[in-house]
Amino acid sequence: MQIKTMAEYFANGETPEVLFWVGCAGSFDQRAQKITRAFAEILERTGIRFAVLGKEEACTGDPARRAGNEFLFQMMAYNNIQVLNNYGVKKIVTACPHCFNTLRNEYPELGGHYEVIHHATFLQQLIDEGRIKIKEGGSFKGKKITYHDSCYLGRANNIYEAPRAVLEMLDADLVEMKRCRSKGLCCGAGGGQMFKEEEKGTTRVNFERGREAVATGASVIAANCPFCMTMLTDGVKEAGKEEEVKVLDIAEIIATDMQQ
Amino acid sequence: MQIVSQLLFLIALGVAIYIFSRRALGIRRNILLGRDVQLNDQPALRWKNLLLLAFGQKKMFRNPLVAVLHFFVYAGFLIINIEILEIIIDGMAGTHRIFAPYMGALYSVLIGCFEILAVLVAGACLIFLVRRNLLKLKRFISKDLNGWPRSDANYILLTEIILMLLFLTMNTADQVLQSRGAEHYYATGPFWVTGHFAPLLSGLSDSALLAVERGAWWLHILGVLAFLNYLPFSKHLHIILAFPNAYYSDLRPKGKMENMPAIQQEVLYAMQPELAANAPASDTVPKFGAKDVQDLTWKNLLDAYACTECGRCSAACPATQTGKALSPRLIMMKTRDRLEQVGQQKNGEADGKSLLRDYITEEELRACTSCAACVEECPVSINPLHIILQMRRHLVMEESSAPAEWNMMFSNIENNMAPWKFSPDDRDAWAH
């Protein structure tokens, strides 16, 4: 894949339409890298002129802030905002709802003002504009899909319909878990939990969510967050359904079934 | 005799209002121990929240059946207060049903409506008692409520049922007395509900009826005044504080954390030292995060008093649901307990305790996923998450207390720009 960086655009005196903020999970986590590649592929195939920051990107500071380390968060925010503002970035799309929330809600008061879009909304816009067309009789046709609301897209930012609208294009059978939309159960990763062992309890949060997702009888669990991806994949494994049930990001699902 | 009764009434009313006002002022003082925050922006949106969330009880309707029952109790409470107004005027002036002659036929219609509401209130409260004590609903049998909180809930429901029954008994006896042309008993015509029960009391003598009517009247109003003073010591205070709490509720997206300008400034000076040279020197050492109730915002403390311990937050909390020590309801209850304790301390005399550890443990704070389900569910706009995150800030920044894995995560972010130990040079490796 030939992905142009912001620096390359800048060197040529050009400006991309949108900056793709990859995020740490999307950059380093092997499973999440596939999501990143799928989304970048969609951007390329729809002819969108996008850039990444590449090595200049750094953690938004979300997990540090939620764990209580405001100093570290402010340091990360300061540096990221410097980089983004130096390039004159106006519009950012990201496949991580945690990055999305921080960039959209927490950077403005620190001097970072951008139009920030989560990839679920971005995909919906591309579909609405006719820039993405779904194959007739694609690989998800007639399959049962259940969508897992991530906390930071859902409750945190009230985005419930865009990802569902995207999945509805597939001609699949979209089934809801009992705890969905604003009542959606967390995957267990937020608030810095991704980076530490869970507290003592009767079960793990991701086991609980995995069981609930598997109980819908869906063969695909659609996610919109790299951390939910990790958590749900483990949850499905714990439920003993890793063969039958796949956890996929909506970008991967669309990349598979979009017309060439 | 009449004047004695008027005097007794005035004394009872005066004492009730005095004790209530003192307690109300005490609660206000406690709430204002909190850190100041400005929550006066966007008044139009705030009024809308007040109307929808408090008056309209919008969040309650996430569970429609319970919402309807709760609405009966709430509407009954508000509307029957009009009747309390008449009772108070009667009590002070020594009159009986003072509104009746002025309202004609409308009066019995109005009382009929109150009676229907009273029946609905009593019925709903009875169902609530069954739900709380017999149905074994998770959020009600939870150990969060062991001891006083569980009794508190039952006392409230029982009191409401008794008050409603007294009101209905009073009206029933009144109508029999009316039909006999008893002195002072203005003929209003039959009331909608108690009219059907009048035959039950028709066997009593005039003096016995008078005793029943006066007895019920006095017990009802004294019960109301006593309940007024029970309120501020009980979870039932939500009937008042739900309103300011809705008005001052957080208008920002639930995912947005409160900024810390002091740290923002410090980081700015570290990055651009030339700015620091001109900065005004400050001799106060800022405190980061919250260790005790005074470090929380006044809205957090208002939240604590507004909490009715319904447990919708904990029922939705991923940590509570998976058996962790954390329960957002308990966070609110403990904050209130601690605030009460601090409020009772004489000036400057500390008890050496704090909200952190003496009330809320690190284990509880660590278990939160910041998913905001508690914030979403709360019918009275309480934000337990805000308290948890402020206390985490204290732990990490004032005490350097964090699990080893978090310290690893911090140092990875600091050194590798990512929470995992990968080389920043490989950040774009996914593309190759």
Image: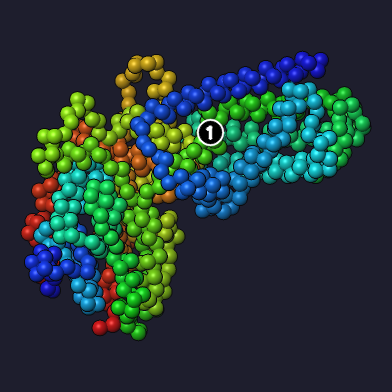
Q: Amino acid at mark 1?
A: Leu
Task: Please tell me whether residue A172 is drawn above or below residue B219 in the rendered image.
Answer: below
**Colour mapping used in the image:** rainbow
Q: Is residue B312 visible?
A: no
Instruction: Quadrant for residue B269, please give it.
Output: top left
Q: Is residue B52 visible?
A: yes
The percent position of residue B126, horizontal first and vertical second, equals 64, 41
Q: Is residue B34 left or right of residue B263?
A: right
| Residue sitting at x 78%, y 22% | B94
Instruction: Quadrant for residue B116, please give it.
Output: top right
Q: Is residue B13 left or right of residue B231?
A: right
Q: Quadrant of the C terminus of chain B?
A: bottom left
Q: Is residue B360 left or right of residue B9?
A: left
Crowding around mark 1 (Cα neighbors within 10 Å: few <14, some 14 to 19, many 20+) is some
Task: Please tell me whether residue B353 is drawn above or below residue A237 in the rendered image.
Answer: above
Instruction: Give the chain letter at badge 1.
Output: B
The percent position of residue A40, horizontal first and vertical second, equals 20, 71
| Residue sitting at x 18%, y 69% | A16
Instruction: Quadrant for residue A48, please give it.
Output: bottom left
- Check the image and name the residue furthest to the front: B278
- Check the image and name the residue furthest to the right: B180
Determine which residue is flagged by label 1: B237
